[in-house]
Image: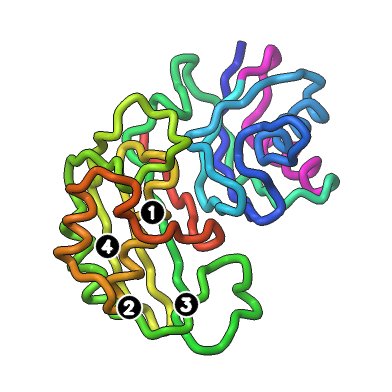
């Protein structure tokens, strides 16, 4: 068998998420159909992260095995040709042959996410579906201060979906930075792995701080409560991007 790694960009808007689901259109299924179309082989691909419905990717990673050897550029170009023909909002940025022990999910050392808040009075036209529109002016400095209280190894039960299947709520959050760039607030989050809805839950809490309703102390207290009820509203999916996976 020959194992391939692919780096993927996609608009999450048209999909029910990364993972294949019965009766739902998923990114995984779209790519698997493209693989079958060019190679004649039915395969199951494994992704580095199971992004939710509406979440985008600039650098998702996946791997799959084929019985025949293919040139990497051929794999990339053939997949893109079939994805384009099918009208999918998915692009294969690169493909490469990798060792048989490479695993897109379990070999990952870090995952990096970006959350975009369009912080302006006017509604979005070009960026609709690609950022969270918040009309009320947010204090990015206050949000960043609160974010630093959440960095490190903690029990993140407060920021964990009730549907999360992780064995433990304890994670190490390596980075949570908030910056303003004009009318956009960018929130960068990095960790080896995340809980289900963790980033969006963190963003929702930080937004409450930015509005002035909550303080950094309150955000820290919410973390320490280890209670989902203490979390702010979960931010919508359209502002979230899986930017990069490190190996």
For label 2, the residue is: 211
Apparent side of residue 79 relative to residue 178 in the rendered image (left or right)? right
Residue 117 vertical placement versus 158 (above, below): below
Q: Earlier in the sequence, mark 1 or mark 4?
A: 4
Residue 208: percent from the left, percent from the top?
A: 33, 70
- Mark in front: 4 vs 3: 3
- Distance CA(mark 2)–CA(mark 1): 16 Å
Position of residue 28 in the picture relative to residue 106 (left or right): right
Q: SS class of the residue under badge 3?
A: loop
For residue 178, the mark is none
How far separated are the C-alphas under marks 1 and 3?
A: 16 Å
Is disc 1 placed on a helix, strand or loop? helix
Q: Residues within 10 Å of mark 4 (few under 14, many from 20)?
A: many
Q: Position of residue 78 (x, y in %)?
A: 75, 37
Element type at mark 4:
strand
The residue to which callout 4 is attached is: 177
Q: CA distance from mark 2 to mark 3?
A: 10 Å
**Marks 2 and 4 close (CB-CB < 8 Å):** no
Q: Residue at x 74, y 30 (%)?
A: 22
Label 3 Cα neighbours within 10 Å, binned few <14 / some 14-19 / many ≥20: some
Q: Which label belongs to residue 134?
A: 3
Q: Most extreme residue toward the front, as rendered?
A: 229
Q: Position of residue 31 (x, y in %)?
A: 70, 36
Residue bounds of the magenta highlight: 65-84
């Amino acid at each position: 068998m020959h194992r391939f790694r692919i780096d993927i960009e996609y608009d999450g808007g048209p999909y029910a998420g990364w993972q294949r689901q019965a009766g739902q259109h998923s990114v995984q299924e779209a790519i698997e159909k493209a693989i079958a179309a060019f190679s004649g082989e039915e395969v199951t691909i494994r992704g580095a992260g199971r992004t939710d419905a509406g979440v985008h990717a600039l650098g998702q990673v996946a791997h799959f095995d084929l019985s025949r050897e293919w040139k990497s550029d051929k794999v990339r170009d053939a997949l893109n040709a079939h994805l384009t023909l099918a009208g999918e909002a998915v692009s294969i940025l690169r493909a490469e042959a990798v060792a048989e022990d490479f695993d897109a999910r379990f070999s990952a050392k870090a995952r990096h996410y970006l959350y975009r808040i369009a912080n302006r009075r006017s509604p979005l036209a070009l960026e609709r579906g690609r950022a969270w529109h918040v009309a009320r002016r947010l204090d990015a400095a206050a949000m960043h201060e609160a974010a630093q209280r959440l960095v490190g190894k903690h029990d993140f039960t407060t920021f964990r979906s009730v549907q999360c299947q992780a064995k433990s709520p304890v994670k190490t959050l390596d980075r949570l930075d908030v910056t303003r760039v004009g009318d956009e607030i960018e929130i960068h989050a990095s960790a080896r792995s995340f809980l289900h809805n963790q980033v969006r839950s963190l963003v929702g809490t930080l937004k409450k701080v930015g509005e002035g309703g909550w303080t950094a102390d309150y955000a820290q207290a919410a973390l320490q409560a280890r209670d989902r009820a203490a979390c702010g509203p979960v931010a919508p999916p359209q502002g979230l991007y899986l930017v990069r996976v490190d190996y």
